[in-house]
Amino acid sequence: FAMQTTLNLDIELNLPIEDDSDDRGEDEIDFEGIDDDLARFQKDAIIKQALNQGVDLRDYSKNIEIELHEVELESVRQYVSHSGRVVELSKEIQSCDLILARMQEMLLGFQADLGGISEEILHLQRESISLNVRLKNRKSSEALLAKFLKNIVVSPELVSAILSTEINEGFLSALSELNQKLKYVRMEAKDEENLGSLEVKPSETLAAKESEPILETLKTKSCAKIREYLLGKISELRKPKTNVQMIQKTGLLKYKYLMRFLCENAPEIGEEIKHVYIESMGRTICSLFRSYYASLMRMELEVATKTDLIAVEEAAFKAMFSSKVDLSKRGDAFCLGNRDKVMDAIEQPPILLHLAQAEGKKMPYEVILRSLLKHLVDSATSEYLFVREFFQDLSQETFQRTFERTLSLFVDNLNSQLFSCYDAIGLLLSIKLVHAYRMVMQRRRIPSLDHFFDRYNVLLWPRFKAVIDLNLKSISLASTKKLGLIDLTTHYVTRRYAEFSASISTLQKGYDFPFDDFELGV
């Protein structure tokens, strides 16, 4: 590198170079890249300084070589002088190599031991999984066996509770357990959800064959006891002055599971109980309403007769054994007065007979009808809810059969009442009452009386139309000579017409009611 650098500088500075004959046979110098070298040397500070001072580069190169040779000799002398320490260092390095070799052997041993431990861990893991599966299978088998024994074995406590003479909470608990055992014994093999992994019917097992006769005996005893108890409670409903709802709540609904047990295990006895209840309760309710209706009708105030028409001859107003006109009969059937207050008492409780009889007051038919309908809808609501809960009857058949006599009684009584009814205001108020109580039942979401309300409307609307027609006919056939003398006071025909029109208009306002079903023609 020093010679090449010297040559590069000699060429750049055009220095004379001796032409030795020994060098002619050498290869020619390659000057490729010399420009780059010169540029790099010109940037070096030492070379710049040497060039500026005019230093001979050949001498400088020889000095450098001499210095390097001296440094090399000095290095050898130092190495020789420290040879002892070098030997010791070599021995220490060999000793470290041995230690590292032993450590490597130990680590390889550890690696082999860890490999063995890993195999043992894998073996233990497989054993653990196997034990877990076996434990799970045994637990499942234990659960199935426990369920089987629970539903097959008949304990002495169960027999004692079923055969006890009293029906109470303990009897209901025992009856529920008995019913569960009966269902399990009757279970089919295809019912995998309840049988688990069992592939045979419980009734085919030896244990079930031994327990089944005992279960059937307990079922027979239970059904007989339940039948006796329920028939006894139902017979109490027929006793006079009996609190029917209290018996239903404390004696029947409290033990509604008895009826469910009968329906599942002895449906013929369940049907018998239902039939007896329908007959007994139907007669009881009908008797109560018949008595209540008769007592109310004895307090009825007759508002209008067949002579109470808008245009009636004056002779009809004359009192018996007198030629004077009875002014007390001039307009009671056409003036509304405060009779529409009955519509504000829709949610009021029914009339209490003993209080009304003690007061000795009379009341128009619409007041009596309001009390009857209020009593009916409350009784129907209570009975409807009881039948649904106790008999699990969602079809309304039991309710309809129970209330059949009572609803027929209502229709017959209304039919008899309408035969002699000429009170148009009372009829219109009765129609509105029927509509109002239909809305009450709709708010309660009980549709059991819809057909009954339809039958009432079928009777009330034609009678109302007939009374209107009688009044219209009386006007069209009226003779002015027979309507009395005209004086300074308002004529009674005019007053009746005005009062009747005002009453109809008043009743029509403020109510969502289908008055357009008939043409009133007023």
Image (cartoon, rainbow, N blue to C red):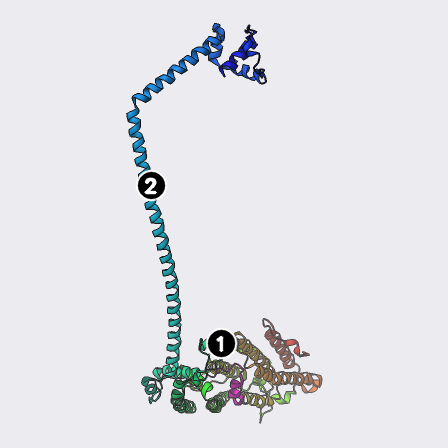
Residue at x 29% of width, y 26% of height: 85
Q: Is residue 119 above or below residue 218?
A: above
Q: Magenta stretch containing residue 394, yes or no?
A: yes
In screen coordinates, is 8 left or right of 126? right
Please tell me whether mark 1 sits on a helix, a strand or a loop: loop
What residue sits right under mark 2 in the picture?
A: 101
Q: Quadrant of the C terminus?
A: bottom right
Tag 2 or tag 1, which sits nearer the N-term? 2
Residue 61 in sight from this viewpoint: yes
In screen coordinates, is 228 left or right of 472? left
Q: How far apart in space, not on screen, are marks 1 and 2 (Cα)? A: 107 Å
The circle drawn on residue 333 is: none
Q: Quadrant of residue 198?
A: bottom left
The span picked out in magenta is 391-405
Q: Nearer the viewer, residue 418 or 127?
A: 127
Front position among marks 1 and 2: 2
Q: Is residue 106 above or below residue 204?
A: above
